[in-house]
Amino acid sequence: MTTSTLTPTATGASHRVDPGPTRRRYLVPAVLAVALVLTEAFNQAVTPFIRHDDWPFLVPENTAGVTSVAEHDLYEGRWLNHLWWAVVGQHGTPTSAAITYALGYALLVAGLWRVLHLAGIRPRPLVDALLGLALYASAVWVQLLYWPGALTASVLVAAGAVWALPWAARSRLRFGLWLVVSEVCVVLTYPPVGVLLVLFAVVLLRRASWRRVLAVVVGWVACFALGVGVAYLLNWIGNDYFGIKIAYWRNPNPLTSWDALVTNTGRWAEAAATLWAAQWWVAVVAVIAVALGLRDAAVRPRLLRLLAALAVAGGIDAAQVLVTGVVTDSRGELWTWYVAVLPAALLLVRVTEGAGGGRLRGLQSDRVGALALALLAVGGVLAWRSDVGEHQATRGEYAAIAAQATRVGPDGERPVVVVYMDPALRHSREGGIMAGTMRMAIRADQDGLLPDWCRPAECRQLIARAASGPVVDLGRVGNGPHVVGVLVPDPPAWIFDAETTTMVGPGATSVATAR
């Protein structure tokens, strides 16, 4: 890779349609600010909904009701997340973590957008704004917002890697170093982010030879494996276990027989079908963009290289399921959003690289690309508003219950709060998650004191008076404290949708460390 590889003039880029560096300097932050509001990401940042298993990364060690961060090292290889927790996470608050995550994500999107500009994709301002909004409003990424404690380190690592990519791509030595450092760091924080790095690196290569592109993809796979090896080694040093343990609830099925292969193949096929059924509109946009791109001489060479990289990403995802039986949850399939966004963006190359304005079946490729980006931007924004809105509604409901239950009484003291949930729900995955979320909401209003589960007599009273609402005043027994009971609401509908295919959580890693 040489400097000329990245220079727009080297490919004959037309500056006639380029808004220019100065105008872009204002366009990028303006679009990101609008995206923050349109998607309701701002609400999640300032009043965050926190998933129960994110609390270990937000509180000090040995806090009641949460697991140890060190346990995540053994089961998930989260060593850099552990470091982030030690230096930053345990000293902050859920709000500071959510704000940092939101800023880190905006920085990452700005970096991805910059890479596309340097790759020669420089449409007029309106289409450029759609491009930025489509990059931001990933209908997959929105599902990660509720783990800011665990995932902030990953988004900052990804942002740093993306911003360093153009510098690294100017020489083979730099690029090799960039691959090693960025991919190892990504594996030690959140492996799915690593796929973005190789996809955007391939796009940045423009018209590089197939040999060079394949070398980059193979190098990325090797660095991915190196990152896994580093995680194994750190677990050996820190936990006396060489590898990453897979928890039983992830339902692993190691590839030890033909029957295991058949079972794991079925799991992968079912998960893939579920994923694309939920994102059918993204798939439709992707198919159209790819079909038109392959018929366009200006787009075809770059699109084929991108498709090769996407095939490798999908292949690794399939391989980890076949080998371990552990299915990656849909929120870990970050690359699937870019199956549509990047081919649509490449359709804009026809104009920016002066390939003529010829029509394809009556439509110019750049116009189809702009329309595709508009559909992705609108669909992505609606997906964010729906997902964040549902979580915010639950957060508001739980916060109101916690505030009512912990209200200071006439005697000037807070009551003792106990919690009840139907045992059948409490021991289910969805019920356990929401019960933990309710208890942590109460804990936040009790100066860090985690409420206990009710005793049998208290539980019977709560069940008998359930019709009165989720907060029940149980009074005093003798000279004992004033007790208030909380009935945990039934799990919301969104938790069942979110956990339907969950075999690997937001911070989890299998043998291949893919989530």
Image (cartoon, grey):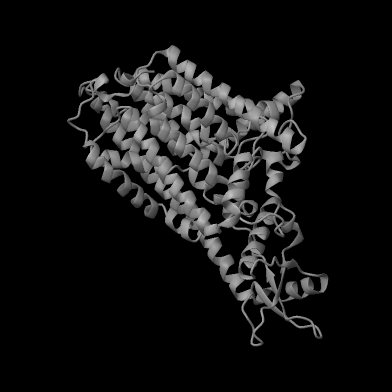
Residue that appears at 64% across and 36% down: 509
Task: Please identify the quarter of the rendering in which residue 233 is found.
Answer: top right
For the N terminus, give its image quadrant: top left
| Residue 250 visible | yes
Task: Please identify the quarter of the rendering in which residue 120 is found.
Answer: top left
104 or 328, which lies in front? 104
Residue that appears at 55% across and 35% down: 186
| 413 shown above or below 340 | below
| Residue 252 visible | no
Instruction: Spot the residue most to the bottom.
Output: 410
| 48 shown above or below 471 | above
Give the image location of residue 282, x and y in percent.
43, 37
| 125 shown above or below 309 | below
Give the image location of residue 343, x and y in percent.
38, 28
Task: Please identify the quarter of the rendering in which residue 253 is found.
Answer: top right
Q: Please indicate whether residue 107 sits to the left or right of residue 69 in the image.
A: left
| Total tally of numbered discs in the picture | 0
Give the image location of residue 352, x and y in percent.
24, 27
Q: Please indicate whether residue 166 sits to the left or right of residue 247 in the image.
A: left
Q: Please indicate whether residue 215 sits to the left or right of residue 66 in the image.
A: left
Give the image location of residue 501, x and y in percent.
62, 41
357 or 165, which lies in front? 165
175 or 511, which lies in front? 175
Residue that appears at 59% across and 73% down: 403
Residue that appears at 52% across and 49% down: 145
For the C terminus, give its image quadrant: top right
